[in-house]
């Protein structure tokens, strides 16, 4: 099973904005079909990069403050954060390889 973090409005800054490893955040919602397709991909990726990066999920319905802060209009939306900044973005269903390659740029 994946080691992806569950993010909330409350823990987002502590988990994502501090630290020197890149963090991939999957902005998703339970009712979103494409988001459900990304679930296993995110879990696998979390396992594969566990020692070099963080992989996390944020439910946009339950955490609207953070979703709106980052201008999330369509989901799934995936953003890679490094040093407290968004350094790369993906929208829609993505291949695990594409996401992994994106993370590796910042490891």
Image (cartoon, helix red, strand yellow):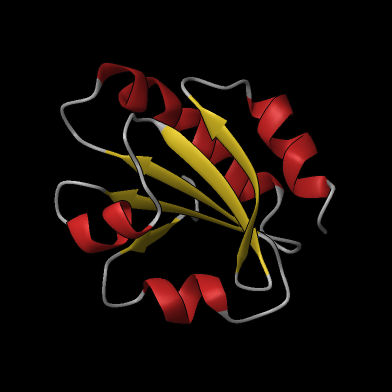
- The quarter of the picture where residue 5 lies is bottom left
Q: Is residue 69 above or below residue 16?
A: above
Q: Quick check: can you spot residue 21?
A: yes
Q: Is residue 103 above or below residue 74?
A: below
Identified at 26% across, 69% down, the residue is 9
* Residue 94 located left or right of residue 106: left
- The quarter of the picture where residue 64 lies is bottom left
Q: Is residue 91 above or below residue 59?
A: above
Identified at 43% across, 77% down, the residue is 13
Quadrant in which the C terminus is drawn? bottom right
How many marks the image carries: the answer is: 0
Identified at 28% across, 53% down, the residue is 68
Query: Residue 63 location, x and y as percent?
Result: 20, 58
Identified at 73% across, 38% down, the residue is 100
In front of the other: 65 or 8? 65
In front of the other: 101 or 51? 101
* Residue 26 located left or right of residue 106: left
Query: Residue 72 location, x and y as percent?
Result: 35, 42
Q: Quick check: can you spot residue 63?
A: no
Query: Residue 104 location, x and y as percent?
Result: 82, 47
Query: Residue 92 location, x and y as percent?
Result: 46, 22
């Amino acid at each position: 099973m994946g080691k992806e973090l569950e993010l909330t409005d409350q823990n987002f800054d502590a988990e994502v904005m501090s630290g020197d490893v890149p963090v991939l955040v999957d902005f998703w919602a339970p009712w979103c079909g494409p988001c459900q397709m990304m679930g296993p991909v995110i879990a696998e990726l979390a396992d594969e990069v566990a020692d070099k990066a963080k992989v996390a999920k944020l439910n946009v319905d339950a955490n609207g403050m953070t979703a709106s802060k980052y201008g999330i209009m369509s989901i799934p939306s995936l953003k890679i954060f490094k040093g407290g900044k968004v350094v790369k973005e993906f929208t829609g269903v993505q291949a695990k390889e594409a996401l992994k390659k994106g993370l590796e740029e910042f490891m």
